[in-house]
Amino acid sequence: MDLRRLTQQSAVEWQIEPHGAMRVPGVLLATEDLIRIMDDRVYHQVVQVATLPGVVEAVYALPDARGGHGFPRGGVAAFDAEQGGVVVSGGVGVDIGWGARVLHAGLNVAHLLSYREALADALHTRMPNGNGARVLRLTGRGMDAMLRGGARWAVEMGYGVPADLERLEDQGCMAGAEPSQVSELAKTRQLEQMGTLRAPCQYLEVQRVAQVYDHQAARTLGIQLDDVTVTLHCGSHSLGQQIGADYHQRLAAAAERSGILLPDQDLACAPLASEPGQRYLGAMRAGINCAHANRQILTHLTRRIFARLFPNVRLDVLYDVSYNTCRLETHEVDGQPRALYVHRKGASRGLGPGHPDLPAAWRDLGQPGLIGGRIDAASYLTVAPASNRDRAFASACHGVAPPPNLPWMERARRGLENFDVLRRLGTLVRGPASSGVVETAPDAGSDFGVIMDAAEQAGLARRVARLEPLIHIKG
């Protein structure tokens, strides 16, 4: 990206001054090095989002931003319904409610290592991840109950325990879901996909706590050096994708009827107060509940698999956050509290300590999060600092890799060198196809510390611990 188009505010804040039809500035929260490797679409998409009606304060790109469809991935924007604000399906993304859940095994890595091959094989063969395994097939009535109830429904069905819900956003169920606004095609596509990891970006990873940075926060979370954690990354699968496809044309038509000139068709939107806008919100919330339920079922399955090798080990939920959402939240703008619809695409909430919307388990600490890599790069367990209430509408990034350099892309096409890297780093990888592993692997030897550094400097997150991958199960 050409830095000459930006005005530097600090080492980690760069502004796009309003020009043309922009209603608010764009703000890029990243270091100069990260901005230089961002593709140019990030700049153009931030500018385009800033032209939409009712947009408030600024359009933000977080340190891991990349070009997407309409919104950049790692993009955040808020809209005020009372000022003609809109809901933008491209500001949510296609895998609605995609997110991360971290489980604490209460197991030391030294105890796990001698069982690591057996555990990797068991997770691959018994976890439904494209290997033909299936957990359940929902009926139509069951589908609607799941879309309304999310993780709560899953617990009622026997997948997990009520205590799990205490550490989930919205206690695992977003209010306002409307299954009736989800098409029959979307529901049919999802009938056999609950409790599965689907390609290309969803995965389960077993990790070890390799370094602790904030010992007080780690004690509050109950983790220590060399503990074993498990991270689940997944979302709403085909249902979320179909909701996006179903509503794209409807929102574009609503924009045309409302006289909204779309700078890009991927920014199809409708006024929040309109019937199409409200219908999309109801369907989207159902998609978020689908993602909550999916991660809850996968948590239950992971516990069963671990229990075969480690009968006395519990996998307690450490936290769960969703990306790819639109939420009605109250934020202070120009000194006044305002009800805003905050779109986060490839970003999560990062509510600071004491926020009333935090689950009780996190309230004094601040919202946990994960900034991380995949397969050959460590992740960072984080918490939101108190200052984050004023940063990008209390948002946090999730650590998607910056675009890999071209020489690595050439090597990745061949694939062999990538597996050499994984073998050398000691990560056991299992997946339905080797090509899927290659496509998802970030740059060899990369460390997402550069994104973590930028997020910390920008006040978006504070690092607690570094998690190194031991086993990686691909969807």
Image (cartoon, helix red, strand yellow):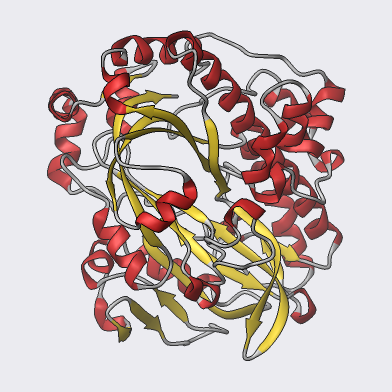
Q: Quadrant of the N terminus?
A: bottom left
Q: Is residue 274 visible?
A: yes
Q: Which residue is found at the position 87% from the left and 39% from the top?
A: 180
Of residue 227 and residue 386, the one placed in the foreground of this image is 227
Q: Position of residue 153 (x, y in %)?
A: 77, 31
Q: 26 left or right of 235? A: left
Q: Quarter-wise, where is residue 121 in the image?
A: top left
Image location (x, y in percent) of residue 86: 71, 68
- Is residue 340 positioned above or below 141 on the image? below
Of 431 and 70, nearer the camera is 431
Q: Nearer the viewer, residue 129 or 369?
A: 369
Q: Is residue 242 visible?
A: no
Q: Residue at the spot x=34%, y=33% of the render?
A: 207
Residue 149 position by quadrant: top right
Residue at position x 76%, y 52% in the image:
280
Q: Where is the C terminus found, in terms of image quarters?
A: top left
Note whether 431 is above or below 42 in the view shown.
above
Q: Is residue 313 left or right of residue 472?
A: right
What is the x, y in percent for residue 165?
Answer: 68, 40
Who's the residue at 44% across and 30% down the image? 106
Q: Is residue 403 left or right of residue 184?
A: left
Q: Is residue 314 left or right of residue 34?
A: right
Q: Position of residue 15 (x, y in %)?
A: 39, 82
